Amino acid sequence: MVTFMAAFNSPTFYKKNFFQLCSPGLGNEEVDNLKQTQTGEFWRWRESNWVNEKIEWRNSRYITVGIDVGSVSSQAVVMCDGEIYAYSNIRTGSNSLDSASAALNSALANLSMKLDAVNYCIGTGYGRVNVPMSDRTVTEIACHARGANFLFGPAVRTVLDVGGQDIKAIKCDSEGKVTNFLMNDKCAAGTGRGMEVFADLLSIPIGEVGDRSLDISEEPAAVSSACVVYAKSEATALLRKGLSPNEVLAAYCAAMANRIIMILERVGIEPELAITGGMAKNKGVVERLTRKIGINPLKTAWDSQLAGAIGAALFGYSLCKKGKGRTTK
Amino acid sequence: MITAGIDCGAKNTKTVVMKDKQIISYALIPTGFDQSGAVSKSLDEALNRAQISMDKVWQICGTGSGAKSIGVDIKINDIKAIATAANYFFQTARTVIDVGAEEARAASIDETGLVIDFAINEKCAAGTGAFVEAMARALETSIEEMGELSLLSYNPIPMNAQCTIFAESEVVGLIHSKVKKMDISRAIHDAIASRIVGMVRRIGVHDDIVVLGGMALNRGFLSSLSRELPNHNILTPRLSEYGAAVGSAIHATRQN
Amino acid sequence: MLVHHGYSDGSGNYFITINSEKCDACGACINACPANVFCIFAEDENDPLNDRPVVSIDQEKRNKIKYECAQCKKCGKDSILPCLIACPIGAISHSW
């Protein structure tokens, strides 16, 4: 990925390729590929790694690593004194032990630095207990808030992360410290999984859901059942009533936005807002959600999927400064 | 006196015709998307079977989630209907549980069938018959077969997912890791039984417990339920699925 | 930090909220709860920079507290919740 890396530093690249950077899989070509190769695989995106060659790791005091093993993707971030030195973003395999190692190996791939130079390693995410090289685990809640603070700046007060299997609503202060949070991983309503069920029902590739739900003449009423099982029967009834698949998608995206707002309201919505996780890429939900709450989410040039791993590496850095890091050669 | 009780449920519409408080006929029609159509169809069929014409029926009482949209003489809420039915089937009933397709309810009742307290599981498929239906689909079997299969299992395994959608993936995962179908079936029934018992605990568990609704036909579910409530009598009538309809037909005899 | 343990599903919100600034992990709630939903973590997984132990909800029970807590939440009566009464500093609240 050397070309990718070099281009990353040019400002025009940011603008032109902002979407690809932040939204792997949503570029037009990618959607076309998706159409041709769709085999029930929903998150198709390029795995990536990147190195900041301006940083000389040997000159840094503390090298920390954060590894975020999620249900869909895993990221490893290497930081030198709190600056991103290298990262990787890969698909999570069926074995999270392997995924953690694979993510780290991918991040270290082109580096002269070896694992024994690392002062602290933190595992986070759904598979955090399966990060064998970690010194400790931290929940993705704490890491997301800290990571969002780094990626989006200290003005972030509300972090919304909608993943494949959960919704996290987090309030944090200017230091990225969590003040109020909830995580809902009990129920599929409002999660990526719920959207997949609908995409399946309507035979629409997941990458097209956002655009197609906005390609309607009149906004239908939102699906009223929160429960995905019941929402599915409601959708079947709507199709029978003569609504087009796009309109049914719109009705579900609206229901999803309502659901997410309800969860956000438990912790309170305060600007600035940062949205991370797979759902950030679904325009159909994000546009309806932001319209309803009247807050435009912050943007970042980085891949927002890195938030958890960045937060973990930053916590490692803080713990090193408190004297808790490993001593290396 | 001839009366009819109609229970318009999320999945099926059931009608029971009673003469002097004895059940003389019954009929079940899938509700589908046309509630009032299903109601008149099931009523016609039940009357046909009893060879009774409509004008001989003194009063018709309706209940169930679709009761609002049907034109009957009087209506009764589902809790009252199942309480009345439980008392009709078993005089000793003090707790009644009704697990339907999209709702589960429980009521504690006195010796005359009056409701003391009740609790409802609704709007989340995990605590209702919809959960078991979805699991049977994931297991590629019928609900009936799944019920029987689970009786063969002596190996309790936990189901971690609470949500029906997540549980579907978990069941598929269990199949892939070669867990026996009967053990998965048992895990499914144990999961729903523990949620139903969780709901019943809100009103207190008192003997005898009567189970009504479509799920009462599922022996696997009943066996899981009795494991969750080892010190209680659990009873179920032969026409358990018609419970709420029976309660409505009895209610129709009471009011003018 | 306000930590909402529990969940929201189609049927409602079921959260036990613990104020970790107030909570001193005295363990009174653990002894009071008949369903054993509370537990103590020596390390705060949600705040790695906090060195104090914290009270949390058992991971196994978090996603079914609607049922776990049912015995204290009787229908038709104002529930008297042992955990709320036991907590000397009012660090616990329930959402349902």
Image: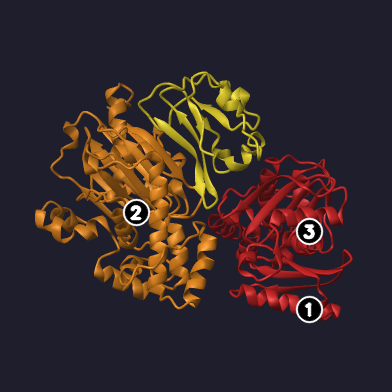
Chain colours: A orange, B red, C yellow
Is disc 1 surrounded by few (<14), some (14 to 19) or many (20+) residues within 10 Å?
A: few
Q: Position of residue B87 (x, y in %)?
A: 83, 53
B165, above or below A246, in the image: above
Q: Identify which residue, B154 or B17, lies in the foreground.
A: B17
Mark 3 and mark 1 residues within 8 Å of each other at the beta carbon = no
**Residue lying at 69% horizontally and 68% vertically, measured from the top left:** B142
Q: Is residue B2 left or right of residue C11?
A: right
Left or right: residue B190 compared with residue A109: right
Q: Residue at x 33, y 47 (%)?
A: A75
Of pointers 3 and 1, the one earlier in the residue sequence: 1
Q: Which of the pair A64/C60 is nearer the observer?
A: C60
| Left or right, A284 with reference to C24 | left
- Circle 2 is placed at which residue position? A90
Q: Same subunit under labels 1 and 2?
A: no
Residue C46 position in % (x across, y down): 41, 33
- The answer to whether tags 3 and 2 share a subunit is no
Element at label 3: helix
Rendering coords of residue A322 (x, y %): 30, 22
Q: Is residue B112 above or below residue B60?
A: above
Q: Position of residue A272 (x, y in %)?
A: 25, 43
Q: Residue at x 50, y 31 (%)?
A: C93
**Residue marked by disc 1:** B54
- Residue A138's quadrant in the figure? top left
Mark 1 element type: helix
- Return the residue at label 3: B219
Badge 2 element:
strand
* Closer-to-camera residue (B165/B247): B247
Please state which amino acid type lies under the numbered disc 1.
Met
Residue A123 appears in the rendering: no
